[in-house]
Amino acid sequence: MNPFFRFHIRRDGVALFLILGLALLLRAWIIATDGIAFESDEAIVDLMARHINQGKPIPTFFYGQPYMGSLNAVAVAGAFRLLGESVETGRIVYAAIFVLTLFSGYGLAHAVSSSSRVAAMALLLMAVPTASAMLSTR
């Protein structure tokens, strides 16, 4: 393998993990300080997760909506079984989903642009949201 190519892989990987680390630190700070109030959307997903763990049927849709599936609630239900029911447990699951979203956004930007630099800029824009987006932990 060309050493120059290896350098780019290392540099791109460092940028990727620095940006992801920044995003995770920001989310961890929000979770640890309880910096954002528990909101109704989170409460509904957590309630759906509780009902799933109580053996009730897995809902097809988000409670009260004829759309938006229940995949988040299924993930939160699994975390509730492992870590116990709490607001923080739900937020940890949302942070994990957020990281997966960042990876997919990076991959999409790289596939469309064929540029690691453009993909890293797109990742940075997704990872460090605007002030209005920070009002929600999801």
Image: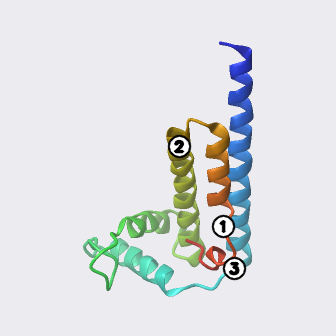
Where 88 falls versus 122 (above or below)?
below
Instruction: Provide residue 33's location: percent of width, then percent of height.
Output: 74, 77
Instruction: Provide residue 106's location: percent of width, then percent of height.
Output: 57, 47
Disc 2 versus disc 3: nearer the observer: 2
Tell me which residue sits at (34%, 72%) in the image: 68
Numbered label attached to residue 34: 3
What's under tag 1, amino acid-wise? Pro
Q: Nearer the viewer, residue 49 or 138?
A: 138
Disc 1 secondary structure class: loop
Tell me which residue sits at (61%, 45%) in the image: 119
Residue found farthest to the front: 113
Q: Quadrant of residue 51?
A: bottom left
Disc 1 versus disc 3: nearer the observer: 1
* Mark 2 and mark 3: Cα distance apart in space: 31 Å
What's under tag 3, amino acid-wise? Asp
Sort mark 1 into few (<14), some (14-19) or many (20+) by Cα contacts within 10 Å: few
- The residue to which callout 1 is attached is 129
Q: Nearer the viewer, residue 116 or 135?
A: 116
Residue found farthest to the top: 1
Contact, CB < 8 Å: mark 2 with mark 1?
Answer: no
Sort mark 3 into few (<14), some (14-19) or many (20+) by Cα contacts within 10 Å: few
Instruction: Provide residue 25's location: percent of width, then percent of height.
Output: 73, 61
Disc 2 secondary structure class: helix
Tell me which residue sits at (68%, 44%) in the image: 16
- The residue to which callout 2 is attached is 107
Q: Quadrant of residue 137?
A: bottom right
Left or right of residue 70, residue 135 in this image: right
* Mark 1 and mark 3: Cα distance apart in space: 18 Å
Left or right of residue 53, residue 135 in this image: right
Q: Quadrant of residue 54?
A: bottom left
Tell me which residue sits at (42%, 67%) in the image: 72
